[in-house]
Image (tube, helix red, strand yellow):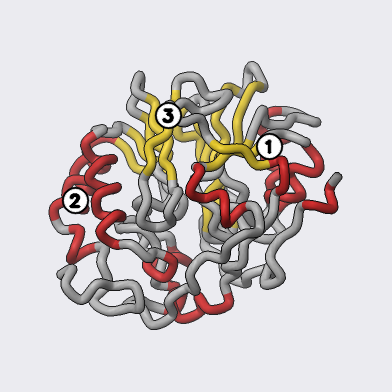
Amino acid sequence: MDQEMNYGSDYKYIPTTSIGSGVGIEVLPDLYCFTIQIVNIHLVGDPQTGDFVLVDAGMPESAEEIFAVIEERFGTGSQPRAIILTHGHFDHVGAIIELVKRWDVPVYAHALEMPYLTGQKSYPEPDSTVEGGAVAKMSPIFPNEPIDLGHHIQTLPADGTVPYLPDFNYIHTPGHSPGHVSLFREKDRALIAGDAFVTVKQEYLYKVITQEQEISGPPRYLTTDWKAAKESVIKLEKLKPSTAVTGHGLPMSGEFLSENLNKLVNDFDQIAVPDYGRYVDKDFH
């Protein structure tokens, strides 16, 4: 049964990390953010009930760390009801096959991400020429071939609901990838943004290492559609989130979040869109 699942042939450990690596933050009583090297996973659910969902699946070769974090928060032998993927880039699906093999739980993603998760289509090559720092320059080593989750991957429901998370809806937020989604809970306006926007300048190594907090657009080296990325940020800002966790960087909340998100919308072309790069429309600025 497991033979059908495989990572792309370019799958490998990526030697980059931040001071936040290995640190978990309880953002809300039922929302836990944990950093693996340079990316965040999110555990959504109450530790008292042990009923939870995992959002995203970390970096390559991080499965043992994910198992340990989950058992520490939810107890020995705990496993999520499902795994929700914001998108299929390597740093969000890095341990997915090991997780699925141990837990045998369903994985959900947007229909437009399916080709990248069923072995059909590679993501566009990362852009090392894009304006930015050392992480952008090292991006050619990042895996971009599709992984194949076989029958374990399912499409998110068309009505916007999120399986096993009845209080959340997903919002299609493309730009960084075609089927990128963000998750939003209306009752407390909690937002899991994925990489639609992030709270660290992900292209710059010293900012990644130090986790210097500033709101930014999606990571530049893997973003291919800046018009869609801008529309997605506008869509998320209109939700007026009170708390946001992102794929990279520290959680943001309250006035600090609303001010920064508003600034990102108003100055998106200056803050987020690189001045040059393979995927930058010369007419965008």
Q: Is residue 143 above or below residue 22?
A: below
Residue indicated by mark 3: 160
Mark-to-mark CA distance, 2 and 1: 35 Å
The kind of residue on which mark 2 rests is Val
The kind of residue on which mark 3 rests is Gly
Residue 87 place in picture, x, y as percent: 51, 50
184 sits left or right of 275 in the view: right
Residue at the outermost front position: 120
Q: Residue at x 15, y 70 (%)?
A: 285
Q: Which mark is residue 265?
A: 2
SS category of the residue bearing label 1: helix
Question: Quick check: can you spot residue 130?
Answer: yes
Mark-to-mark CA distance, 2 and 3: 24 Å
Label 2 vs 1, first from the N-terminus: 1
Q: Which is more toward the observer, 229 or 206?
A: 229
Residue 82 place in picture, x, y as percent: 64, 32
